Amino acid sequence: MKLYHFVSILLTSCFASQAFGQVAAPRVGAVRYSDGSVWGLFGVSRNFVLNGQLAASTDAASFSDSGGLISIQGRIRLVGPKGALVDEYDSGEAHPVLSVTGDLTTAIAWLPTRNQFVRWNGRALVVTEPDTAALRGNVGSIDAVDAHHARAFIQATDQTVSVALISTDTGAILSNHALSYAHGPAIQQQSFVICVNDGQLEERTATRILHSLPFNHSGIAFERAGSDWIHITTSDSNDSWMLHITGSAFDLSQIPSTPQLSAGAAK
Amino acid sequence: MRILIAFGLLCASACAQDLSFYVDPTNGSTACSQVPTTLTALSASTPYQFPDTPVGSSASLFIQIVNVSSSPVLLASAYVGATAGTSTVNPNFTVSGLDQSATIAPGSCSPFTLTFAPITTGSLAGYLQAAYSINQVPNNIAVTTLEGNGLPPQLTLTCSGVSACSTNPLQPSVTLSFGTLTQGAQVAVTFTIANEGSSTLNTPTVALQTAQFLSSPFSINTSTLPATLAPGASGTFTMTFAPTQVGGTASVFTATLSVGANLFPLQGVAVSPTNNDPLQVCYTDAQGDRVQPNSASPINFTPVPLPANATAVLNFVIVNPNPVGTSYADITLPTTPSLAGGSFAISGMTLAPQSSDCAGNIFATPGSGSATSVTPGQSVDIQPGWGLTFQITFTAGQQAATGTLTIPTVSTFSLVGSAAPVALQLALMCGSTACPANMSSDQQVQATLALQANAQAPSSVLLSIAFTSAVKGISDDSAVTFISPFNVRTVGPISFTQGSTTGTFSSGQSQFTFQTGTTAGTITFTATDSVTSETQTWKIRIAPTAPVITSSSAQWQSPSLLVTLDGYDNTYSVNSLSYTFYDTNGNIVPSSPLPDSVVESDFHTYFFGPADTGGMFGLQANFPVSDGNVTQIGSVAVTMTNSAGATSTARISFQ
């Protein structure tokens, strides 16, 4: 959801012409705080500035650089890169699991009480009912793999994690296998899995750890704040963090609390 | 006092025919008829020299006046004048024993004694003169000039017991005051006669001469005086002034003390006992001066604020200023003084005689007796000349304190004491060590506040963070702030509980997190004591650095190339930006550089525009490829320059 304006500058290269983009504030995305408020956030790792409140009293949210899903009192809203409403769906779900990883066609929601997926097909938010018997446990995160498939990370009560591939056209569960390396929440980030394993926050494949950081907290939850940013909250701290993931970076930073939360905590 | 009549003309020569004056060494044993032939006449032209005489002593000369005329002479007076022909007497010479109303028949004698009693030292002269009448005609005769030399006194008189004794040694004719006493009181003065000469002297006769018809309030006791005084020895006697009657509100009593030939006027004043003075309250300040407080002004225990736990003590006394011995002037406190105010404590209540009242007036007779301790809460009978003493101690805390001293039936006084603010002695800790004086931009730092070793803990502090930009035209960087536990620039209160050297928030959390921002400058932390407002500051410098690119990406977006950079320039001075493209074989693809002026202008417009994001920037560049085959370009490297230097990325692969 970068908001850059481009100014083209024609160069004399034999096969490439060069354009210089105007400079702008580096925008992280949007982050949902523990009080349900959603705030815009500027910054680079280890240096963040809040950029105004975007919504209040949300149940869940997920953002990429191209847009986002916000659930307010069970009503799931798909918004564009500038916050304009694209479509909405009244799910009646108090705690939907939302995901937008790229453009708006990656927008998908899991409704745990209804065992339904809701996704944007380019024209409307549509419902898919999977084989509910196979999706046992708590769906911690989902993402749209392509236009016809979704991926769900399912956390069992013993903290073991499995990942299921589901046809969003038929609802059929095409595969479901356990992630032996994950013990707690997990979320897909591009080609890799972000998970928690033995006090470490890891970016990994099935066989290899790309990056890891110590992160010894309980009640960890992931929520996507931007295409390259994952917001992390825990149940044992009032603090929250932002994980920046790029091809080379795997940075974990604290993010500022909101003025309301600061005022409330100070009382 | 005798009145001397001065005559306008002295008959020094003519009158000498009427009266002659002879020195009689036999002290009157020589028959008058033999005087003119056996004794030496005084001559107007020849001065008579007295022997050298110490002040306080005297030398006497027996004189016979002989009427050498043929007519009776009526003698009026004989005296020693200060100058020739004057009626003013010379106090160093005296005439005594003269029968001044005598008529001297022709050839007859009339004796008198001429005494030289110097009241001062040095050469002294007087003029012996006589007044008489003969045949109804008054005459005045200059007999002779008298000379003498006053030596330093052999005997000195000093006293003690009243303030007037401060003029010791006493001078004859100078009034000695016994002060003002309330009727019924008394004061005793001890006099000392000392022989300062080199030979033993007879102790002069000491007597009290009173003029009161009734009994005098003055009395004397000479029983301890010795008969003689060896060189260097002294003897004492006492006089007491004890007025028992007062006419009206006050009476002045006088008397004369005679010591040998020297006379000392005495005076004492008696006042009615109905004028009893009330109790006085005073304390001794730091300079040792007695101060009488008033209820309208607080008693300040600390002209200079004290450090915590230090103490200041003022010694108080409640004095009965009435004269000692006036038992009817006893004053009773219904209960001892009491205090309110936790920083003040009263102790050491003692009933004791005093030498003076609160105004500094020394009691004519100091109170006497033994001091006794007084139990708090009991009634206290304070006699004249006595006082109730006690101490009040102020113990400084961490701020000013007030209290109240209540003295029943007398007054209530406010007490104040001030405490010197305790300097904060904290350490800003970044982990297990003190935060460094220099840090870099784009940091999140977890820190705590800790007490320095052996430092006194403040009750609580507020900790604030402020930023001073080193970039001209930039005043602040909003990212420089606490982000945890609160996203504010002042956090707290941070308290220091007993036994812990690390400050904690009310939640029990001790750690806080702050950001160093992306602007060169100085971060200032200020801890402020919640009670005393004392402050302590720490400064952390953020040095200018070359641009920092925190993340980068390159994408084929046919028919263009998209290069995205995020980072910061803490000098706000990016002035050059170059992209170097490489084909998939790693060969440089020629391209023209971006004009620096465009880069500098765009960055300047952004940094100094409305965005409140410090030195952070995001830059996305779009490069259209002329033939649309973007996959020929494999990677790109970017170099960015500001006033502090240049930074280059590694090759960023296109994806």
Image (spheres, helix red, strand yellow):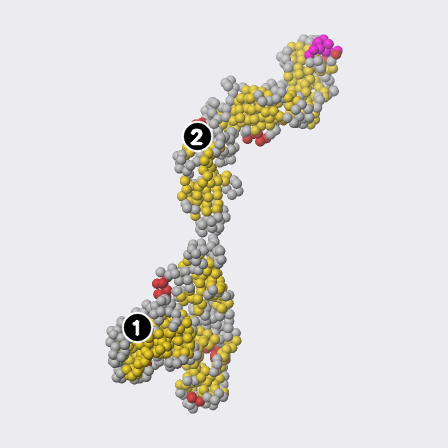
According to the picture, the residue beneath numbered tag 1 turns out to be A157
Q: Secondary structure at mark 1?
A: loop
Viewer can see residue A223: no
Give the vertical position of B345 relative to B477 (above or below). Answer: above
The secondary structure that most of the magenta stretch takes on is helix
Q: Quadrant of residue A153?
A: bottom left
Decide: is B498 above or below B476: above
Q: Magenta segment: does it hold B29?
A: yes
> Gap in Å between the C-alphas at discs 2 and 1?
93 Å
Q: Image quarter for residue B229?
A: top right
Amino acid at the residue labelled 1? Thr
* Marked residue chain, label 1: A
Question: What are the residue bounds of the magenta stretch?
Answer: B28-37
Instruction: Say which of A237 and B578 sits in front.
Output: A237
Left/right placement of residue A70 relative to residue B243 reads left
State whether residue B99 appears in this view. Answer: yes
Residue B452: mark: none
Question: On residue B330, which mark appears?
Answer: 2
Which of B283/B425 is in front? Answer: B425
Residue B537: percent from left, percent from top = 48, 61
